[in-house]
Amino acid sequence: MFKIKTRIWIENETGDFIAKGRIDLLKKIDELGSISKAAKSLNMSYRKAWQLTNAMNKLCNEPLIVKITGGFKGGGTQLTKTGGKAIATYENLNLKWSEFLKTENVELI
């Protein structure tokens, strides 16, 4: 018996919007408050993390993350409500899809 495994990508006509790696990045930004720290924790370059978050922000009507400047602790990056909703929506969709796939078994040989 074989199991079906897939990954979910959410995209539009211009390209990828959200997938597992981007969700992981958003969650780390929320946890650590910094694109740089999030990238480092995921063994990703800052440039790549910035490109991914910038692309997501451009594809969405509202930003998923925003830069915070200055202040007592210095600057950083913050996940927005829209970013939190994107994470929750993706994870809910992924959970539903995983539950469905558990019911499907494939017998090839």
Image (spheres, grey):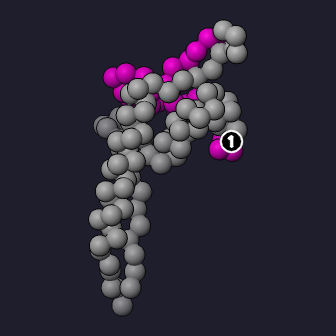
Q: Position of residue 91 (x, y in %)?
A: 40, 48
Mark 1, secondary structure of its residue: helix
Task: Identify the residue shown where x is 33% and y is 85%.
Answer: 107
Where 106 sits versus 21, above or below? below
Is 14 on the left or on the right of 57, as rendered?
A: left
Where 70 sits versus 60, above or below? above
Q: Dot 1 corresponds to which residue?
A: 41
Q: Which residues are magenta?
A: 42-70
Task: Identify the residue shown where x is 29% and y is 74%.
Answer: 104
Is 88 on the left or on the right of 70, as rendered?
A: left
Quadrant that contains the C terminus: bottom left
- Quarter of the rendering containing residue 50: top right
Classify mark 1: residues with Cα within 10 Å, few (<14), some (14-19) or many (20+): some
Looking at the image, can residue 96 be seen?
yes
Q: Position of residue 98 (x, y in %)?
A: 36, 62
Residue 53 on the magenta segment: yes
Task: Identify the residue shown where x is 48% and y is 42%.
Answer: 23
